[in-house]
Amino acid sequence: MDMGAGIKYKRVLLKLSGEALAGNNGFGIDPLQAESVARQVNEIYELGVEVAIVIGAGNLWRGRRGLERGMDRATADYMGMLATVMNAMALMDAMERMGMQTRVQSAVEMRAVAEPYIRRRAIRHLEKGRVVIFGGGTGNPYFSTDTAAALRAMEIGAGVLIKGTKVDGIYDSDPVSNPNAVRFDHLTYIDTLNRRLEVMDSTAVSLCMDNHMPILVLNLWDGDILVRAIHGEHVGTLVAD
């Protein structure tokens, strides 16, 4: 694949919530939603951009509910890690049906369905034009998939961490409940942490700050926004130095 003209980012890490694959009720895996995500990724894939993906598990497992019932935190987190691999496989299937070469790597070993996460192998897959989907979080409890996304973005040398959400950036309050909420075009890492803006958890933001990894938050469902972002257009909210 040849890089298109005017491409700002050669390699990106796309962070998706599990809800990106869910149906209207917010739970489960809807094949139509998986195909919709795959189509959007395919638009930048065809430009020659190297794409890695981390996906959450909120559509299959909400660990907080388990904790409220007294569940052990580590157990709840491991269940979430397993659920991310199910989401990764669903997304892999949708992408491959569109002709994209895809590999799933899991931080929790399950060799029958996914490669183990090996950094150098992941980079080699990207160099060969394969989309790499990272499942299993970091492989450790107490770390979110946001933190897994930040960690993997650094490990593979991504140019940007793109968080695809259902809102068009970061606001000073919830834009759904507050029609007067103000959207930020740009924020520093410190501002994001100090304002306690819940776009990513503080561990993920701090990791990006320490390693100068820009975070771009955008509405994944806003037309060709991924393509526009890859070309360097000012979309969403950029968190950077």
Image (cartoon, helix red, strand yellow):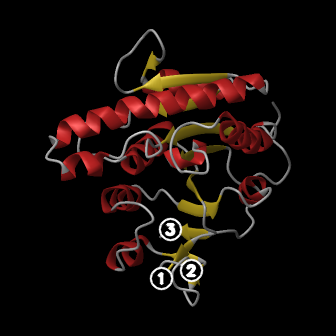
Closer to the N terminus: mark 2 or mark 1? 1
- SS at badge 1: loop
Residue 238 shows in this picture:
yes
Task: Return the x and y of residue 46 as percentages of the image width and height.
Answer: 81, 37
Q: Which residue lies under the disc numbered 1?
A: 172
Q: Nearer the viewer, residue 167 or 28?
A: 28
Question: Which label sits on residue 184?
Answer: 2
How far is disc 1 from disc 3 in space, using C-alphas? 17 Å
Question: The disc labelled 2 sits on which kind of residue?
Answer: Phe
Gap between marks 3 and 2, in whole Å? 12 Å
Within-10-Å neighbours for mark 3: few <14, some 14–19, many 20+: some
Horizontal arrangement in the rendering, residue 163 relative to residue 77 (left or right):
right
User: Which of marks 2 and 3 precedes in the sequence?
Assistant: 2
Q: Amino acid at mark 3?
A: Ala
What mark, if any, has residue 66 been given in the picture? none
Q: Residue 240: which disc?
A: 3
